[in-house]
Image (tube, rainbow, N blue to C red):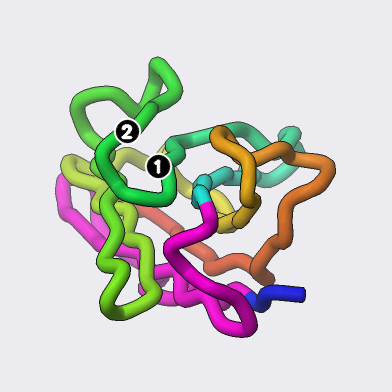
Amino acid sequence: QVQLVESGGGLLQAGGSLRLSCALSGGAFNNYAIAWWRQAPGDQRKFVATINDSGDWPYYADFAKGRFTISRDNAKNTVYLQINSLKPEDTAVYYCAADTIFPPREKFASWGQGTQVTVSL
């Protein structure tokens, strides 16, 4: 069973940027597609972006196109999510998920514990 650890969240101001990281251990990193999801208070978990095992197929939810960038460094066993022009509505717990299938299957993926992102005006 792979383990995923997210980091990089925090309290930020609107208009700023941040980069979230998702580190995978316990498995061959380049065998896994990785996805980012987020869950805002009182809302369902929503898909944000995903990237295939080799890193050449990023895919984004419509709301994430333009401000979010997913990337991976297979040498560091890490996937990143860059968020620019932060908005208060980006406030959520951000989770990464790993699966050997692309795109990762929500029900069958391995999940991290999440990292909180809070954006203030």
Indicate whether 44 appears above or below 81. Answer: above
- Tell me which residue sits at (22%, 34%) in the image: 67
Compared across the picture, whether 98 is left or right of 22 comes to right
Indicate whether 57 appears above or below 95. Answer: above
Indicate whether 43 appears above or below 100. Answer: above
The quarter in which the N terminus is drawn is: bottom right
| Label whose residue precedes the other's in the sequence (1 or 2) | 1
Number of the label disc, if any, that sits on residue 20: none
Check disc 2: other Cα within 10 Å, few if <14, some if 14-19, many if 20+: some
- Tell me which residue sits at (55%, 50%) in the image: 92
Indicate whether 107 appears above or below 9. Answer: above
Q: How far across and how far down the image is residue 89, in percent?
A: 44, 36
Compared across the picture, whether 105 is left or right of 75 comes to right
Q: Which residue is mark 1?
A: 51
Please name the amino acid that badge 2 sits on. Answer: Trp
Q: Residue furthest right?
A: 107
Q: How far across and how far down the image is residue 60, in percent?
A: 39, 27
Q: Quadrant of residue 94?
A: bottom right
Q: Is residue 104 magenta?
A: no
Q: Quadrant of residue 87?
A: top left
Instruction: Point out the stretch of residues depicted in magenta.
Output: 4-32
Number of the label disc, if any, that sits on residue 57: 2
Q: Secondary structure at mark 1?
A: strand
Q: How far across and how far down the image is residue 15, in percent?
A: 16, 45
Please name the amino acid that badge 1 sits on. Answer: Ile
